[in-house]
Image (tube, helix red, strand yellow):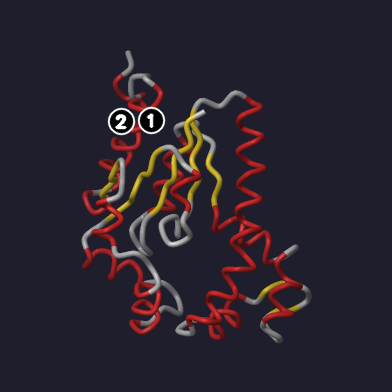
Amino acid sequence: MIVVGLTGSIGMGKSTTAKMFQAAGVPVHDSDEAVHRLYASAAAPLIEAAFPGTTVNGMVDRTRLASTVLGNPIALQKLEDIVHPLVRADADRFLARQKAAGAPLVVLDIPLLFETGGRDRVDRIVVVTAPPEVQRERVLSRPGMTAEKFEAILAAQVPDPEKRRRADFIIDTGAGMDEARRAVAVIIATLTGEKPAEART
């Protein structure tokens, strides 16, 4: 089973690209979705203990948590020390299930793959990218996002050029989603030895 690590900086189109892999029949583990589940379960009491007042009715309030840790490297590290091992364990269970099911190819959607030292967990890395002006426009159009928040998030991430340098495959969503979909098909074909779906007769 080939394990692909899918990553990319905020606003690059990584989540959309992950859905393209899913639509093509590739099992995908979504780290962000796992965090959402954990914030409503195992992680909540641990986060409340570390950051009092950040949970409501036993669930993490993401807005309260963000206001506590954003721009505070020590607090952010403390949060990551709680959450990352739980997400990794969730991903390991996913991999075990897919391996048992005989899946030839799976994707781990990991936003902070490089930042968390996840290179050793995957066989190939796909980096989703877009021009800086496209990235900025996408991110600033999100509800509640400000230029200051955007800059703080960027500062905590490995720069896009460095991610692209360390990638096995690059998908540029700035060229349009149809191009991205074709790139996904080519990557799947390259790794599985099958023709892309659009090339089959």
Q: Secondary structure at mark 1?
A: helix
Q: Which mark is residue 188?
A: 1
At x 74%, y 63%, the residue is 42
Asked if residue 136 is positioned above or below residue 131 in the image, the reply reads below
Q: Which residue is mark 2?
A: 186
Which structural element holds mark 2?
helix
Determine the residue located farthest toward the top in the rendered image. Answer: 201
Q: Is residue 121 above or below residue 63?
A: above
Q: Nearer the viewer, residue 110 or 141?
A: 110
Residue 199: x percent and y percent?
29, 21
For label 1, count other residues whose C-alpha is less than 10 Å away and answer few (under 14), some (14-19) or many (20+): many
Q: CA distance from mark 2 to mark 1?
A: 5 Å
The total number of labels drawn is 2
Dividing the picture into quarters, in which one does residue 55 lie? bottom right
The image shows residue 186 at horizontal and vertical percentages of 30, 30
Q: Residue at x 61, y 29 (%)?
A: 99
Which amino acid, by three-letter code, is at mark 1? Ile
How far across and how far down the image is residue 78, in percent?
Answer: 59, 76
Residue 154 is situated, as x and y percent measured from the top left of the image, at 35, 72
